[in-house]
Amino acid sequence: MKRTVEIGGQNFTVELRPSDSASAFEVWLNGARLEVDCQSLPDQTWSLLSPSGACFCCRVLPGDEIGDWEIIAASGLHLRARITDPRQYLPGRAAAHAGGRFARRSPMPGRVLRVLHAVGDEITASDTLFVIEAMKMQNEIRAPRPGRLAALHALPGAVVAAGGLLAEIE
């Protein structure tokens, strides 16, 4: 899969190829090969680890534009990226906008600092649901779609793992 990605006004050509390792991908960035261990997490989130130890969490941002991504590095670097390729299909993205119950999971490990809505509250897409502290940074966890908050699975003070269930929206 080959895509054009814009980060900070600069365009990059990114190509993903399966690797011999079950969880690794060959990543080609502007023609240079990188080996990356990639673990898929719920809610269109991926954890990436390079052989040098660099760790990134990449996730699709909620909203109308399916090509918007958030990239968070373990070092604290926080970037936004946009897939500018016309083939912007991202598998599973439609599920966040479809009816039925949707599980909101934590894109990173951390401690829940605040819960901003109660069960039964009507929410809109991009409403902040939780604030999670990870690596001394406060991260807002937003609703991927509008709906009603059906269940809370994490309260202030709770420690959550990456991919841990936070809430359900219907």
Image (cartoon, grey):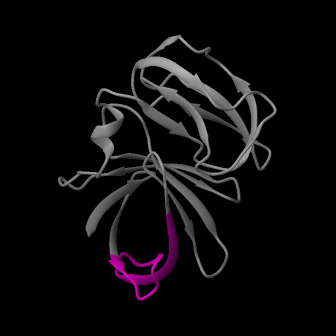
Q: Nearer the viewer, residue 150 or 136?
A: 150
Q: Nearer the viewer, residue 46 or 82?
A: 46
Residue drawn at x 58%, y 76% is: 50
Quadrant of res 75: bottom right
Q: Is residue 5 above or below residue 100?
A: below
Q: Residue furthest top?
A: 121
Residue range in magenta is 17-39
Residue 151: percent from left, percent from top: 56, 23
Residue drawn at x 31%, y 38% is: 95
User: Is 154 left or right of 72, judged from the image as shown?
Assistant: right
User: What is the number of callouts on the image?
Assistant: 0
Residue drawn at x 63%, y 51% is: 162
Residue 25: percent from left, percent from top: 42, 77
Q: Is residue 38 magenta?
A: yes
Residue drawn at x 68%, y 59% is: 74
Q: Nearer the viewer, residue 134 or 155?
A: 155
